[in-house]
Amino acid sequence: MKPSLLVTAPGLLTTIQDRGRVGYQHLGVPVSGALDPDSLHAANLVVGNAPYAGALEVACLGPTLVVEADDIRVAIAGANAPIDILPRTDAPSGRQVAGMQTLRLRRGEALRVGALSGATVLYVAVEGGFDIEPVLGSVSTDIRGGIGGWQGRAIVAGDRLPLRQMQARECPEVGLENVAMGSRPRIRVVMGPQHDHFSDREIGAFFDSEYTVGPSANRMAMGLSGRNLQHCRGFDIVSDSIAPGSIQVPGDGRPLVLLADRQTTGGYPKIATVISADLPALARSPIGAKVAFEAVTIEAAEAARRAHVAELDAMRDRIVPLRRSGTEMALALHECNLVSGFIDAAA
């Protein structure tokens, strides 16, 4: 049987995402990809995959996954959530484990991720990755387009997600230390291509205001509630390209930040664009979070990007061997066949 993860509970919205489908926006194909690429990077790094290999993106409430392989190694990064390893799928409880570290699961065990807090998404990376054919160079799920990922949709109960490895490598378990995936007090932006559709007074109000992430936030866009902005040159423009982090202001005056599943073109004025270094922090902000903006120059945005990439590269230096507790050591010894040839202790 092919190694896989059996989905017994899919969670609220669980999809397979990688870096995204880059290079096809001129053909009308959205990029998609991870809503929080920093956490995707961290999960893959811990488990030994390429930084942006395909992983499960979990939103709001996590799935329950049963191992149908000899054993697997996973790592979870992103939002806080209760994480349990169950001895079998119908077990009421198991051992609770932490994120930002490798976890080894054996055949028949189940990984259960509960309700998320502190951020909108987390990522479950599996050592070796998922055995899924890329579409236009990416395994990211584009739900609206029905392409990529697992059958172009969110996972559902009964799915078997194919894995590339039947067994985990024999290596020490590790964790990632002193890495903060938090928010920023103010999100940095550069002025948008249609900021001249707003008066100086309205632009000043935009930067002086505090907004709240609204309940309509999703993978396509984050709606912000707060002070509505007034257009001085109308709210219809000839549709032009949408960059990641573009902040559109439609006719109702409520800013919309365009995210991973954004459309490729749009016909509303864009007052500003979130810089790439800050977009992951904004995208992981949960509903109800407070958001404020500050303007920076393009040169400052480029410097921030270089610093951000350097921080991601430095994560590798924060991978450390796990320090096992006494209980974990006892469980590990119990599972070993210490007197081979006489008694099978594991039996």
Image (cartoon, rainbow, N blue to C red):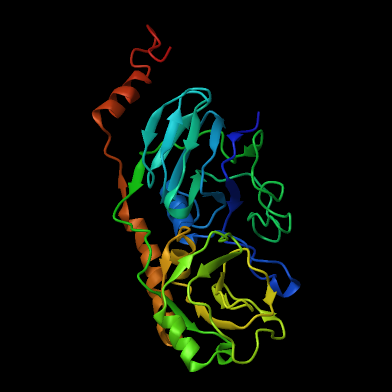
Please state if 260 lies on the left or on the right of 82 as rendered. right
Q: Identify the residue shown where x is 59% and y is 48%.
A: 13
Residue 186 horizontal/vertical position (percent): 38, 73
Q: Quadrant of the C terminus?
A: top left
Note whether 295 is above or below 168 in the view shown: below
Between residue 190 and residue 345, name the one nearer to us.
Answer: 190
Residue 12 figure quarter: top right
- Toward the viewer: 344 or 30? 30
Residue at image coords 63%, 56%: 140
Decide if residue 76 is on the left or right side of residue 256: left
Most foreground residue, 267 or 279: 267
Coordinates of residue 136 in the picture (x, y in percent):
70, 61
Q: Looking at the rendering, which quadrant does residue 339 occupy?
A: top left
Residue that protrudes farthest toward the left in the picture? 326
**Viewer-proximal residue among 204 and 178:** 204
Confirm whether residue 72 shows in the render. no
Total number of numbered discs in the rendering: 0
Q: Residue at x 56, y 38 (%)?
A: 165
Q: Please tell me whether residue 260 is drawn above or below residue 302 in the rendered image.
A: above
**Please, is residue 332 above or below residue 312 in the view?**
above
Quarter of the image for the N terminus: give it: top right
Spot occupied by residue 331 in the image (x, y as percentages of width and height): 33, 23
Q: Compared to 91, does 292 lie above or below?
A: below
Residue 339 visible to an observer of this rendering: yes
Residue 200: horizontal and vertical position, in percent?
48, 93
